Amino acid sequence: MTRDLAQVEVIAPHFKRRLSGVTSTVIQLVPVQNSLGQKVVTFGPGLPSHLPSMSAADLWRLWRPPVGRRCRVWHARRNIEMLPGILLRDVLRMPLKLVFTSASQRRHTGWTKWLISKMDRVIAVCQKTASYLERESTVILHGIDLERFSPAGDKAAAKQALGLDPARRHVGCFGRVRHQKGTDLFVDAMIRLLPDHPDWVAVVAGRATAKHVAFEDELKAKVKTAGLGDRILFVGEHTNINDWYRALDLFVAPQRWEGFGLTPLEAMASAVPVIAADVGAFAELILDGETGRMVERGSLDSFVDGITPYLADQTLCREHGAHALAHMRAHFSIEREAKAIGEVYADLLDAG
């Protein structure tokens, strides 16, 4: 969907075709930002056609600012999007202000530091990310669509609709199936715990890309050897993942590394408590002992210890799930995130 550039105040470039967390962020945020009057278009491949966009043929029009403004905002989320913004602003002298959102939690290379130093404003997705930036930043935590991710009105019916046994409780681990995501830690924890908790079933939802199929096959073989093939289910990738969250009683986020990580938010918005490794922004999302538990990254024993009380106590799952839902509604709507980003835009646009 093309939008009149004379009215556009913000450009959200997207220069990778591969689906990623950045892609998901842009797809979810841009419609909300526009509903709030922020006048945003996307630029680049790999995005749905329903998003407002501009084409390469429109680039020359960026020499003229939008109606009523002296500049536009170029909001980059990757190195390959920062550099073109710098060239457009500093070489071609287009009236642009540059914003970069960082999700990285590692020391930046000299090249990335240089790119970041040229930005007019920097947003960090969490405090841990901000700690790696060698300049001032604004911390804006991600939010999610609280209508799409919401509790089941009838959990038994939600389970049955997915072919799950409504008489049993379900613990899930969702996301790409690979070592980095800790899928093996979840499976190993379930192999250890499920024999003592016969009313529970584990669900692994997500796709293993070609590079990681052997890893997934090894996990399935391990499950079969343990005699738990009917209780540790690999259900693959689903576009209706929100329905799968609604069927859960407990969620586990066992990642070994994560930039931010939306799955705990999606689970908590579905009134499901979360056991999470101390990676990414998880410690800033989860209230330890109230909406779930934080455990040691990469430690099977720590995961087992964190999960066990929930398998043993259905009341604990319900209470912490209710706390999780209230926490999400108070602090993590995507509208809150969009409004906070809009304030950064407004500062730059008003200053010109």
Image (cartoon, rainbow, N blue to C red):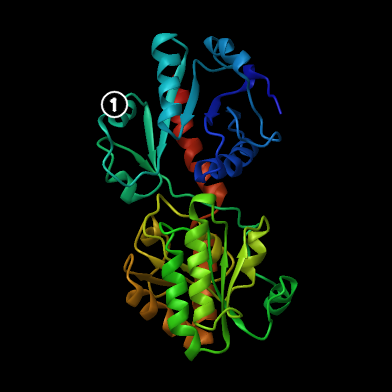
Residue under numbered circle 1? 114
Residue 302 left/right relative to 340: left
- Point 66% across, 30% down: residue: 52
Residue 129 in the image: state x and y as whole percent. 33, 46
Q: Please tell me which residue lies in front, 123 or 55.
A: 55
Occupied quadrant, residue 47: top right
Residue 90 in the image: state x and y as whole percent. 39, 13
Residue 58 in the image: state x and y as whole percent. 61, 15
Residue 4 left/right relative to 171: right
- Point 73% across, 76% down: residue: 160
On screen, residue 329 above or below 252: above
* Numbered disc total: 1
Three-letter amino acid code at the position of disc 1: Trp
Residue 166 left/right relative to 348: right
Quadrant that contains the C terminus? top left
Residue 82 left/right relative to 31: left
